[in-house]
């Protein structure tokens, strides 16, 4: 193999890394470039898969860090509020300090998140073999990238691990609301015919994420319905008195609808956790099936295969 990098190799790698700036919408670009270059350039393939991992798995890490810091800051804020009664400290000063630190932290984390892909793009533009901290080294080992070229038997990256990485990143992208579905959709369309494993994982991930998204929309719709019906019932009351029968019905209905919507919203993080677990299982070598969704997709694919065999016959 020729280890010299062409201009095309560098351009593909640069665009893949810079796609992280699109905040989720660019997650399909690394898969497209990887699909195009996977048996043309190991360098470009690795950089694309690394960029994909940064946008999906990396997004999960950053999101968890945000939640952890926010939780810690809330605890600190409540502890600080106890100083209001004991010291000459006003509530406004505590809230101002807390909000200022939170804003600075969020902007700082966002700057770091965007800075790393820019550094990666610049490095690749100069033909350097960039590695993200922690992620890059582990991914190179997982794909066999470091050992490529050391023997004639392994001229390319490990194909099974490539497919598993792309499938797993599709599962992890569930935290990227709506745009995360672009990852499994792109993998299915571009590589589904070559790899039945990648096709199955991508299709079931797409169906699962779409279902979670519609559940979230359903919760919002239910909440809005309650907010619309409540003033209608109040208006229907001749006296416009909240204590009137119709008014009380509106209040009870609003509270019931809000509780249902809240219960649905509280289930969303559990769906997200299941998506992360699915990605972990796929990386570990399992052919993971989502409850119910996996079986339905498997049946659908079996019908497609049988239909194709009948057409050939």
Image (cartoon, rainbow, N blue to C red):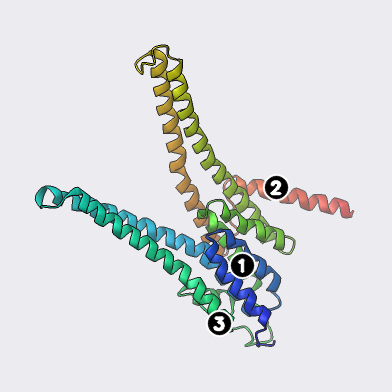
Q: Which residue is mark 1?
A: 30
- Residue 189 position in % (x across, y down): 71, 58
In the rendered image, the quadrant that contains the N terminus is: bottom right
SS type, badge 3: loop
Q: Position of residue 239 (x, y in %)?
A: 39, 12
Give the alpha-carbon distance from disc 1 to disc 2, as whole Å: 30 Å
Residue 256, quarter of picture: top left
Q: Is residue 135 left or right of residue 308?
A: left
x 51%, y 67%: residue: 54
Please give the name of the residue rendered at 50% of the width and 56% of the height, measured from the top-left corner: 276
Mark 1 residue element: helix
Check disc 2 and report its element: helix, strand or loop.
Answer: helix
- Dot 3 surroundings within 10 Å: few (below 14), some, or many (20 or more)? few
Q: Which mark is residue 148?
A: none
Instruction: Tell me the mark number nearer the camera, choosing from 3 and 2.
Output: 3
Q: Which mark is residue 299?
A: 2
Residue on which the image places disc 3 = 129
1 and 2 marks in contact (CB < 8 Å): no
């Amino acid at each position: 193999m020729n280890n010299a990098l062409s201009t095309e190799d560098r351009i593909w790698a640069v665009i893949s890394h810079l796609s992280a700036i699109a905040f989720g919408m660019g997650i399909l670009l690394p898969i497209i470039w990887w699909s195009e270059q996977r048996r043309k350039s190991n360098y470009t393939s690795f950089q694309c898969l690394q960029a994909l991992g940064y946008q999906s798995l990396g997004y999960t890490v950053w999101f968890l860090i945000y939640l952890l810091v926010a939780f810690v800051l809330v605890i600190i804020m409540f502890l600080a509020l106890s100083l209001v009664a004991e010291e000459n400290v006003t509530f406004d000063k505590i809230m101002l300090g807390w909000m200022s630190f939170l804003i600075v932290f969020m902007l700082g984390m966002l700057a770091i998140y965007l800075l790393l892909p820019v550094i990666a793009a610049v490095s690749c533009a100069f033909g350097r073999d960039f590695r993200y901290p922690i992620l890059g080294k582990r991914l190179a080992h997982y794909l066999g990238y470091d050992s490529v070229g050391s023997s004639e038997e392994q001229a390319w990256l490990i194909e099974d691990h490539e497919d598993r990485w792309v499938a797993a990143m599709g599962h992890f992208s569930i935290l990227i609301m709506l745009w995360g579905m672009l990852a499994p959709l792109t993998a299915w369309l571009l590589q589904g015919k070559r790899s039945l494993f990648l096709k199955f994982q991508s299709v079931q991930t797409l169906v699962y994420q779409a279902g979670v998204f519609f559940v979230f929309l359903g919760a919002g719709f239910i909440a809005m319905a309650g907010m619309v019906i409540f003033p209608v019932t109040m208006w229907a009351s001749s006296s416009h008195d909240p204590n009137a029968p119709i008014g009380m019905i509106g209040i009870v209905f609003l509270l019931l609808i809000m509780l249902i919507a809240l219960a649905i919203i509280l289930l969303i993080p559990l769906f997200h956790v299941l998506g992360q677990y699915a990605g972990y299982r796929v990386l570990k070598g399992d052919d993971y099936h989502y409850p119910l969704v996996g079986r339905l997709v498997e049946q659908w694919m079996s019908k497609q295969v049988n239909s194709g065999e009948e057409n050939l016959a």
